[in-house]
Image (cartoon, grey):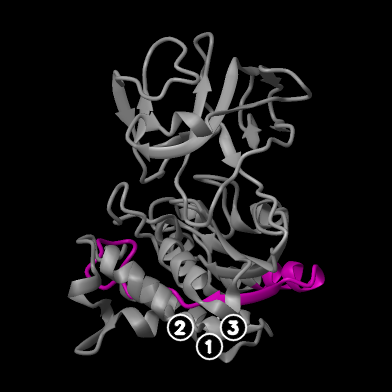
């Protein structure tokens, strides 16, 4: 397991980390509770700007199983490395609950702290599909604890396909992320190397990002970018993937008519259309394209999302929309 203090300015000490199969809420299957050690030690101190991997542990994890990670923090610790849009309930309580089958939380949250990765040994592993993007990949608008982001639906489709046994899906979406500017998370052209190409066993990548570059520029004129600049950033990521023999697929940007300006405006829409035209032409020479927009747009008004897929903000899909996105992906791309 990887724990991270990548964005911290001071060391972080974790007094203990356990892993178990989750049974819902703040409860685990206690018979599966497993201590993770770091260089043989039960605790770990991660220096500012660094990450740490646990030692390998014997822990059986069947496919599509919920994992519960319990972290004990022995002292007040500022949190700088956090996945804000977790869409899963995190239980928090005072004291040390390591090894407890359940505990009563004093508060709940929906963000992940410090834990950023889990590698699983699978003798039958054949491939890893990484979904890379912004809040649409991260699952904004999905139902908390329902696992209905588009990569969740894709993972279940992959698991059910006899031809794709041994494949897994990793979600590397960050809500608010952009291709070209740091704002929430490092910019896409920078973090692609770490979050996609640095994923153990990666064989395929799906890139769907760029709408925040268009929208945020309206709030901060100094960070306004052109469609050509977004395209150049996407091309950079495609080239990086191909250089590592990772098959890469570009996804079109979703329709968002009805979203408040500056995300939706005539100028913003022109940029979105230009980026999508470039993606569809596959000038980037990606392995292929996934036309998410075509699956999501309203036939009566193609500039907006279908009502039944709209979470309500006209930008992010709901659970049904995310399922439609996953269904728009031809699994033959990975066979």
> Residue shown at 72%/53% (left/top)?
198
Q: Which residue is mark 2?
A: 291
Nearer-the-camera pick, 220 or 131: 131
On screen, residue 282 versus residue 78, left or right, reads: right
Of 223 and 279, which appears nearest the observer?
A: 279
- The numbered mark, 2 or 3, whose residue comes first in the sequence reads 2
Could you say where residue 213 lies in the image, as x and y percent from the top left?
A: 48, 61
Residue at 44 percent across and 51 percent down: it is 176
* Disc 2 versus disc 1: nearer the observer: 2
Give coordinates of residue 294: x percent, y percent.
37, 85
- Mark toward the viewer: 3 or 1: 3
What whole-number distance in Å separates the C-alpha atoms at marks 3 and 1? 16 Å
Q: Which region of the structure is painted magenta?
A: 235-264
Which of the marked residues, 3 or 1, is nearer the chain's N terminus? 1
Sequence-earlier tag: 2 or 1: 1
- Percent across and percent down for residue 284 are 67, 82
């Amino acid at each position: 397991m990887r724990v991270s203090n990548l964005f911290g300015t001071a060391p972080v000490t974790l007094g203990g980390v356990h892993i178990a199969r989750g049974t819902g809420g703040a409860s685990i299957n206690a018979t599966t509770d497993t201590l993770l050690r770091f260089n043989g030690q039960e605790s770990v101190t991660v220096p500012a700007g660094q990450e740490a991997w646990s030692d390998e542990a014997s822990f059986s994890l069947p496919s599509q199983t919920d994992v519960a990670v319990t972290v004990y923090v022995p002292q007040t610790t500022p949190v700088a490395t956090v996945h804000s849009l977790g869409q899963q309930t995190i239980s928090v309580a005072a004291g040390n609950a390591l090894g407890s089958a359940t505990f009563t939380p004093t508060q709940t949250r929906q963000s992940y702290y410090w834990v950023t990765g889990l590698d699983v040994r699978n003798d039958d592993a054949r491939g890893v599909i990484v979904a890379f993007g912004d809040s649409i990949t991260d699952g904004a608008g999905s139902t908390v604890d329902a696992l209905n982001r588009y990569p969740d639906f894709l993972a279940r489709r992959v698991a059910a396909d006899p031809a794709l046994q041994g494949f897994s899906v990793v979600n590397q979406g960050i809500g608010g992320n952009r291709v070209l500017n740091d704002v929430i998370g490092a910019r896409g052209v920078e973090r692609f190397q770490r979050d996609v190409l640095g994923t153990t066993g990666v064989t395929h990548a799906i890139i769907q990002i760029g709408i925040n570059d268009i929208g945020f520029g309206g709030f901060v004129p100094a960070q306004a970018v052109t469609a050509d600049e977004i395209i150049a950033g996407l091309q950079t990521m495609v080239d990086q993937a191909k250089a590592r023999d990772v098959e890469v697929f570009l996804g079109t940007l979703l329709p968002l008519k009805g979203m408040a300006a500056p995300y939706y405006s005539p100028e913003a829409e022109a940029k979105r259309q230009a980026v999508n035209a470039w993606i569809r032409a596959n000038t980037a020479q990606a392995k292929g394209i996934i036309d998410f927009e075509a699956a999501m747009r309203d036939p009566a008004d193609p500039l907006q999302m279908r009502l039944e897929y709209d979470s309500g903000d006209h930008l992010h899909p709901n659970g049904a929309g995310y399922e439609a996105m996953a269904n728009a992906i031809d699994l033959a791309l990975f066979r």
